[in-house]
Amino acid sequence: MDPSSPAIEKFILANLPIAPVPTVPEIRLHRAGPRSGLWRLAGIDGAFGSPYWAYVWGGGLALARHVLDRPETVAGLRVLDLGAGSGIVGIAAALAGARQVVAADTDPHAMAAIRLNAAANGVSIAPLHGDLLDGSPPAVDLVLVGDLFYDPHLARRVTSFLERCLDEKIDILIGDPFRAHLPRDRLRLVAEYPGADFGEGGRIVERPNGVFRFERPGEPSR
């Protein structure tokens, strides 16, 4: 399926209203509601995965909030938003002064959402469709990872990729609501933000959300 399909963008514009994001009102996103009918996307292109990009997730909210509150985190840097979903973290990085932002996701529908959300917030982001986890890290200075530790197999793959990023001297920040599959021995808590998260069964729940620096064991704190 062509990730640049205009039919997907047309569907998002018609069915996912744009509104400020909870805890990050500086950013406006197209988000799903009870009547969005996301199941109809399969009728457009014959493909339908889990539309994670259509909802807010706690780790992404915390990471976006952190980046906007501390723009020095990203200012002037080349940034990768890994598992970007709606693009909220990449948008925050662009608003905070990142030199370049690449937003990567495996869901082709997310590419359309990222383009529309970036345009709605007046920033430039390069959507990248594909699975980066088994390859070499791209040429960036900072990787931002929101909510990729919800599944044990995925968590292992993400951790391996992030270890290769460290080998390339790339800094890494993770946003996550303290899920069980976080590599705790590799993380240093940087900040904590209360807020909403997309829970099981599509329920929105309130929980603490952490921002962590991914480090080698025994690495001195910065």
Image (cartoon, helix red, strand yellow):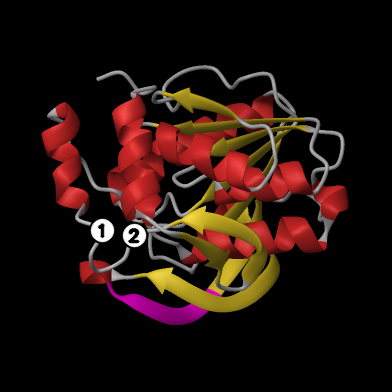
Q: Which residue is mark 2?
A: 32
Image coordinates for residue 21, horizontal then vertical, percent: 55, 66
Report helix, strand or loop for mark 2: loop
Left or right of 5? Residue 126 is right
Does residue 215 appear anywhere in the picture? Answer: no
**Residue 179 is drawn in which quadrant?**
bottom left
Instruction: Please say if the residues under marks 1 and 2 sit with CB atoms less than 8 Å apart.
Output: yes
63 w.r.t. 215: above or below: below
Report helix, strand or loop for mark 1: loop
Q: Which residue is mark 1?
A: 36
**In percent of the image, x 38 and y 36: which residue is there?**
9
116 inside magenta stretch: no
**In percent of the image, x 63 and y 75: which residue is there?**
193
Image coordinates for residue 40, horizontal then vertical, percent: 15, 45
45 w.r.t. 209: above or below: above
Given the image, on which type of amino acid does mark 1 rest?
Ser
**Residue 158 is drawn in which quadrant?**
top left
